[in-house]
Image: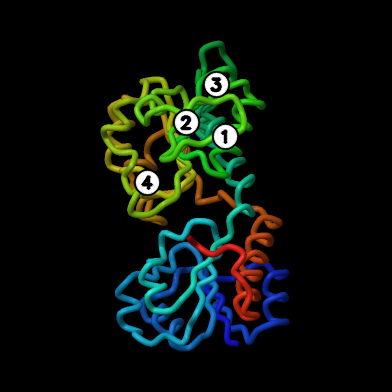
């Protein structure tokens, strides 16, 4: 079976794939072009895509009888794939949950601490050569220990963040979730506005039409002036224009972002703000994690090829 791997993956994953399939691997680190998207459907049996490979309805419309039968997504988020249209065209879709949980939660804590304690701003000060030495009121930030964290989305990643915040920093945890759930630690499920009124707010919901701009002007208005917002979910969950307005008007103290609404485009209005920590989508950027993601995607592909139930079929 012919397998297309759309981006360079760790050597361990590539070697494992080549032992089982006829592999074509793109060398480009950029998303598939519109022409490549369509070619992937009619030239290959299996495709291992990832973030940015935009399998939208028009792509399937242009390939009414695709050869491909599986999109084994590399990553837990799959809002770049129109799953309903893919299914209608005869393709199964899988993802890689679990493998990304702890690494993404770690990045959330990184952004919480960097933003609350103004670490990125401080590093820029030191690198610029303008630091004049310690003094008692220099770069005062938010003390995280013992504060309240509001987590929007209490799935695997939300729970991992909650554990780190509660047990690591003694934080009170409140959360908003679309269904009633028990996170397995002391935490209160509350309406969105109440979760947004915490000292630290972390966005951890899946991407997709149901959550696009979930955090807009109304939700941001519920935040406290000293609070910070952290997004490790998908960029379009937050209305970037509304966030920029809240930051520029000092209605919130800061933001820590690993994802962006029009990634990789990051608005200059965000880049010039010292109150914002900006990371280049580092959520799962550790070799062992990326290897685990790749092997999980490959497990889905092998199961499909062998006619077995897919371990991680997208519901």
Image x and y of residue 279, in percent: 50, 46
Disc 2 and disc 1 in contact, CB within 8 angstroms: yes
Q: Name the spot of residue 26 as percent of width and height, x first.
A: 54, 78
Q: Distance from label 2 to label 1 (Cα)?
A: 9 Å
Callout 2: few (<14), some (14-19), or many (20+) C-alpha neighbours within 10 Å?
many
- Marking on residue 183: 1
* Dot 2 or dot 4, earlier in sequence: 2
Q: Are marks 3 and 2 in contact (CB under 8 Å)?
A: no
Up-down: is 150 above or below 263? above
Q: Earlier in the sequence, mark 1 or mark 4?
A: 1
Q: Nearer the viewer, residue 25 or 176?
A: 176
Dot 3 or dot 4, earlier in sequence: 3
Secondary structure found at label 2: strand
Label 4, on which residue?
A: 237
Crowd band around label 3 with a 10 angstrom C-alpha radius: few (<14), some (14–19), many (20+)? many
Residue at the spot of label 2: 175
For the residues labelled 3 and 2, the Cα–Cα distance comes to 10 Å
* Mark 3 or mark 4, whichever is nearer to me: 3
Image check: 42 left or right of 217?
right
Cα gap from disc 3 to disc 4, whole angstroms: 24 Å
Which is closer to the viewer, label 2 or label 4? 2
Q: Is residue 51 left or right of residue 165?
A: left
Q: Out of 257 and 57, give the one closest to the viewer.
A: 57
Residue designated by label 3 = 172
Q: Residue at x 32, y 31 (%)?
A: 220
Query: Alpha-carbon distance for marks 3 and 1?
Result: 13 Å
The quarter of the picture where residue 216 lies is top left
- The answer to whether the residue labelled 3 contacts the one labelled 1, judged by CB atoms less than 8 Å apart, is no
């Amino acid at each position: 079976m012919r397998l297309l791997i759309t981006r360079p993956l760790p050597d361990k994953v590539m070697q494992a794939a080549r032992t089982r399939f006829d592999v074509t691997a793109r060398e480009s680190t950029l998303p598939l072009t519109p022409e490549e998207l369509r070619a992937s459907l009619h030239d290959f049996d299996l495709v291992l895509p990832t973030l940015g490979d935009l399998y939208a309805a028009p792509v399937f419309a242009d390939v009414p009888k695709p050869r491909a039968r599986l999109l084994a997504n590399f990553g837990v988020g799959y809002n770049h794939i129109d799953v309903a249209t893919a299914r209608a065209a005869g393709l199964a879709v899988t993802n890689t949950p679990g493998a990304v949980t702890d690494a993404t939660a770690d990045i959330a804590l990184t952004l919480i601490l960097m933003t609350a304690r103004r670490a990125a701003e401080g590093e820029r000060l030191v690198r610029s050569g303008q630091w004049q030495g310690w003094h008692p009121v220099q770069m005062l930030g938010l003390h995280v220990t013992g504060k309240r964290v509001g987590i929007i989305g209490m799935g695997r990643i939300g729970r991992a963040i909650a554990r780190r915040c509660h047990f690591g920093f003694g934080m009170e945890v409140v959360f908003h979730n679309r269904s009633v759930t028990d996170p397995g630690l002391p935490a209160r499920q509350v309406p969105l506005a109440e979760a947004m009124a915490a000292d630290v707010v972390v966005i951890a919901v899946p991407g997709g039409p149901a959550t696009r701009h979930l955090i807009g002007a109304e939700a941001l208005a519920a935040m406290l002036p000293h609070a910070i917002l952290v997004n490790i979910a998908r960029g379009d969950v937050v209305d970037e224009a509304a966030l920029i307005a809240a930051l520029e008007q000092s209605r919130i103290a800061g933001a820590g972002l690993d994802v962006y609404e029009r990634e990789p485009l990051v608005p200059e209005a965000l880049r010039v703000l010292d109150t914002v920590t900006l990371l280049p989508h580092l959520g799962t950027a550790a070799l062992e994690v990326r290897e685990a993601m790749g092997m999980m995607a490959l497990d889905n592909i092998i199961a499909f090829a062998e006619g077995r139930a897919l371990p991680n079929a997208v519901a």
